[in-house]
Image (cartoon, rainbow, N blue to C red):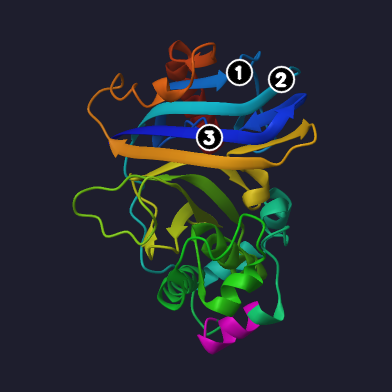
């Protein structure tokens, strides 16, 4: 499946600011099931762009804009080729719990087993687990399926009720939220069970026959859980389904705090207003849809990744093969 993503972020300031320092996590990852075909990042006003790979393997672009400006725009466009993940069974044997307790598992996945800023235990979370009988006996995979279905069946999808900084107690109290909240709730429960789990930031491409609860043309979040017998498995608790070829991964982390699309600071006496526009669609050409990016004003600086995409994908595949040997 060939997916095109266009993501425009614009900051407007109530008065000119003196300087802005910004980082962006908008470039899709390359992996065994996802190949980055092309990526462009345009910035206005003009700034020199740099990039590095963070400790989780996510690509981070960053820049410093030391000049007065009253708005700042970042426009990212990516084309990604995805394939369906390997089939996932309904259950595994009960010995999987014993495998999760082996000494090398906590050491290898230490960060994805600990509570994090947004995904941590609480009395409200414990009440949710108890009320739905999620601690009932069963193998780890069966529990994960039950948990994802319980979150989807219990919580209404309501944008605007929570914010990016909301603790999971808000969604638990109102029985409503968005994909970020549902991912954090699942992370907290799964880690409490002793199963490594990580937050996934990305996009979900809608098709004619899909019936997703999550908003169209928006960023998306889900969870990947690690089992010794199967490796990382993607669960989308917003839509009560496993991650598929329609899920495009941008970054992974302990929770949202590790992988926000943009993050930065500025110097100046002004209030900021954030505007975001996203388009996600299936495409047949890597060159289609550039009119969306053109909404950034002239004078922009562009960062393009095209020739390096194939090399990056080949390197990722080679590393994957080495890890499996």
- The answer to whether residue 37 shows anywhere in this view is no
Residue farthest to the front, as pictured:
15
Classify residue 183 by image quadrant: bottom right
Q: Secondary structure at mark 1?
A: loop
What residue range appears in magenta? 125-134
Assess disc 1: are there few (<14), some (14-19) or many (≥20) residues with their C-alpha within 10 Å of its C-alpha: many
Q: Earlier in the sequence, mark 2 or mark 1?
A: 1
Residue 9 disc label: 3
Q: Nearer the viewer, residue 257 or 64?
A: 64
Q: Describe the element under mark 2 as helix, strand or loop.
A: strand
Residue 122 at what x, y percent from top left? 71, 76
**Label 3: which secondary element:** strand
Residue that badge 2 annotates: 65
Q: Position of residue 300 (x, y in %)?
A: 54, 14
Mark 3: give few (<14), some (14-19) or many (20+) Cα within 10 Å.
some
Q: Gap in Å between the C-alphas at discs 2 and 1?
A: 8 Å
Q: Earlier in the sequence, mark 1 or mark 3?
A: 3
Q: Can residue 278 be found in the magenta stretch?
A: no
Whether residue 178 is visible to the viewer of this picture, yes or no, is yes
- Which residue is found at the position 56% from the left and 27% from the top? 73
Q: According to the image, label 1 marks what residue?
A: 45
Task: Tell me if residue 185 comes above or below residue 278 in the rendering.
Answer: below
Between 41 and 139, which is closer to the camera in this rendering? 41
Q: Position of residue 97 (x, y in %)?
A: 58, 70
């Amino acid at each position: 499946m060939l997916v095109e993503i266009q993501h425009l972020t614009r900051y407007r300031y109530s008065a000119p600011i003196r300087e802005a320092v910004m980082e962006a996590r908008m470039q899709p990852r390359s992996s065994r099931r996802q190949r980055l075909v092309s990526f462009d990042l345009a910035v206005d006003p003009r700034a020199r762009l740099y990039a590095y790979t963070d400790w989780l393997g996510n690509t981070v672009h960053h820049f410093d804009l030391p000049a007065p400006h009253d708005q700042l725009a970042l426009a990212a466009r990516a084309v990604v080729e995805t394939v369906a993940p390997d089939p996932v069974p309904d259950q595994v044997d009960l010995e999987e719990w014993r495998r999760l307790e082996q000494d090398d598992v906590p050491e290898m996945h230490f960060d994805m087993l600990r509570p994090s800023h947004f995904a941590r235990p609480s009395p409200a979370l414990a009440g949710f687990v108890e009320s739905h009988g999620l601690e009932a006996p069963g193998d780890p995979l069966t529990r994960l399926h039950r948990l994802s279905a319980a979150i989807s069946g219990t919580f209404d999808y309501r944008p605007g009720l929570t914010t990016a900084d909301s603790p999971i107690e808000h969604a638990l109290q109102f029985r409503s939220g968005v994909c970020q909240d549902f991912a954090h709730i699942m992370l907290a429960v799964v880690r409490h069970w002793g199963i490594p789990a990580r937050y996934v930031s990305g996009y979900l491409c809608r098709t004619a026959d899909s019936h997703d609860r999550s908003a169209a043309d928006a960023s998306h979040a889900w969870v990947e859980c690690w089992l010794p017998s199967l490796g990382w498995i993607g669960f989308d608790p917003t839509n009560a389904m496993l991650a598929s070829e329609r899920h495009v991964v941008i970054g992974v982390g302990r929770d949202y705090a590790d992988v926000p699309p943009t993050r930065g600071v500025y110097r100046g006496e002004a209030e900021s207003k954030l505007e975001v526009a996203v388009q996600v669609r299936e495409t047949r050409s890597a060159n289609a849809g550039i009119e969306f990016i053109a909404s950034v004003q002239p004078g922009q600086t562009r960062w393009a990744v095209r020739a390096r995409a194939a090399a990056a994908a080949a390197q990722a595949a080679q590393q994957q093969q080495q890890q499996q040997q």
